[in-house]
Image (cartoon, rainbow, N blue to C red):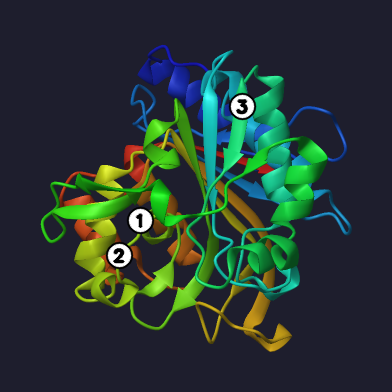
């Protein structure tokens, strides 16, 4: 991805050249993209949408293509880094029920981190159901075994009280692997939620702390943004290959699921969630935590403020 400024004339040339629409990557080893040129060419914030269109497309390859479009995993991970990936594996639900992060996406992200030279890759989530059962049923355990990533079992000894400096939350138990890492990747699944409307990237941080969940669910939009301000991931990748459209956040029935074959990658957590909200036919400004995240400067829900990229497989 090019970071240097681009002139208005160059922008116009690109718009003309790319007016044919999005190109298709097919089975090529690298993604082929069409860039949606905006006035934000010189800004540092960006978002990439991956779209799986081919029948039987590879979820792992789409994940790789999305990162390649963003400049490659080496742009985010340095050799020798300890990387913690925060998926949503809180429920003992099979992957096809869309309650948890797709294990194929998780596997691809781990492999990319390892290829970028990460010293260690760890998977961390403070699960709601029994952790060992969650690891087995969601596929995270198999992914860890296959890739050699460390799957962290959440224990009370790993919770440390820290000052979150939030508008609602002050001192709260934090899952320490997430603050001890050199780099953190947020890897949520997209689904509906009975209290917050949606659960996307920012809400995924509720699984990064301890304490009483019932207390976190009070003034939930304030809670979500407080946590998102504290945990600052280097990147957010929203798994929307399958989304939960009803009975969230735990679901449990295939009828709760819609296959949309999307991945959303961004270095702006508010923009990632705003893009994810559109998959549910929701206006980002109507989702409390997205609106607050934008208002408090955590990111933007205005796509014109970002460089936008798409890749199709």
Q: Mark 3 points at which residue?
A: 120
Mark 1 element type: loop
Q: Name the residue under label 1.
A: 209
Q: Residue at x 64, y 46 (%)?
A: 50
Residue 204 appears left or right of 310 = left
Relative height, residue 194 to residue 85 (above, below): below
Task: Using the image, tell me which numbered label, if any, was put on residue 211.
Answer: 2
Q: Position of residue 284 (x, y in %)?
A: 34, 64
On-image quarter of the C terminus: top right
Q: Position of residue 183 (x, y in %)?
A: 46, 29
Q: Which residue is drawn at 30% across and 65% down?
A: 211
- Nearer the N terminus, badge 3 or badge 2? 3
Q: Which residue is drawn at 20% across and 59% down?
A: 292
Separation (CA) of disc 3 from disc 1:
22 Å
Q: Residue at x 69, y 88 (%)?
A: 255
Q: 282 or 293: nearer the eye?
A: 293
Q: Where is residue 61 in the image (x, y as percent from the top left)?
A: 79, 40
3 and 2 marks in contact (CB < 8 Å): no
State which quadrant residue 27 falls in: top right
- Nearer the N terminus, badge 3 or badge 1? 3
Separation (CA) of disc 3 from disc 2:
28 Å
Does residue 280 appear in this view? no
């Amino acid at each position: 991805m090019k970071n240097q400024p681009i002139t208005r004339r160059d922008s116009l040339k690109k718009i003309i050249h790319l007016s044919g629409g999005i190109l298709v990557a097919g089975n090529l080893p690298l993604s082929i993209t069409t860039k949606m040129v905006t006035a934000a060419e010189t800004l540092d914030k960006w978002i990439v949408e991956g779209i799986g269109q081919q029948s039987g497309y590879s979820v792992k390859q789409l994940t790789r293509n999305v990162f390649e479009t963003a400049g490659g995993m080496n742009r985010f991970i340095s050799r020798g880094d300890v990387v913690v990936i925060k998926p949503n594996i809180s429920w003992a639900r099979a992957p096809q029920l869309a309650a948890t992060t797709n294990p194929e996406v998780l596997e691809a992200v781990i492999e990319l981190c390892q290829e970028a030279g990460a010293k260690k890759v760890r998977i961390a989530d403070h699960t709601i159901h029994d952790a060992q059962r969650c690891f087995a049923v969601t596929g995270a355990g198999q992914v860890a075994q296959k890739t050699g990533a460390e799957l962290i079992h959440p224990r009370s000894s790993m919770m440390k009280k820290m000052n979150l400096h939030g508008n609602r939350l002050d001192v709260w138990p934090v899952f320490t692997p997430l603050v001890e890492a050199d780099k953190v990747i947020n890897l949520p699944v997209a689904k509906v939620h009975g209290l917050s409307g949606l659960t996307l990237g920012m809400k995924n941080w509720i699984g990064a702390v301890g304490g009483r969940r019932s207390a976190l669910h009070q003034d939930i939009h304030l809670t979500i943004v407080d946590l998102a301000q504290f945990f600052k991931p280097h990147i957010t990748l929203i798994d929307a290959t399958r989304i939960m459209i009803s009975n969230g956040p735990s679901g449990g029935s295939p009828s709760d699921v819609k296959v949309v074959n999307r991945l959303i990658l961004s270095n702006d957590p508010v923009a990632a969630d705003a893009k994810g909200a559109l998959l549910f036919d929701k206006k980002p400004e109507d989702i409390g935590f997205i609106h607050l995240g934008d208002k408090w400067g955590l990111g933007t829900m205005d796509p014109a403020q970002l460089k936008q990229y798409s890749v199709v497989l």
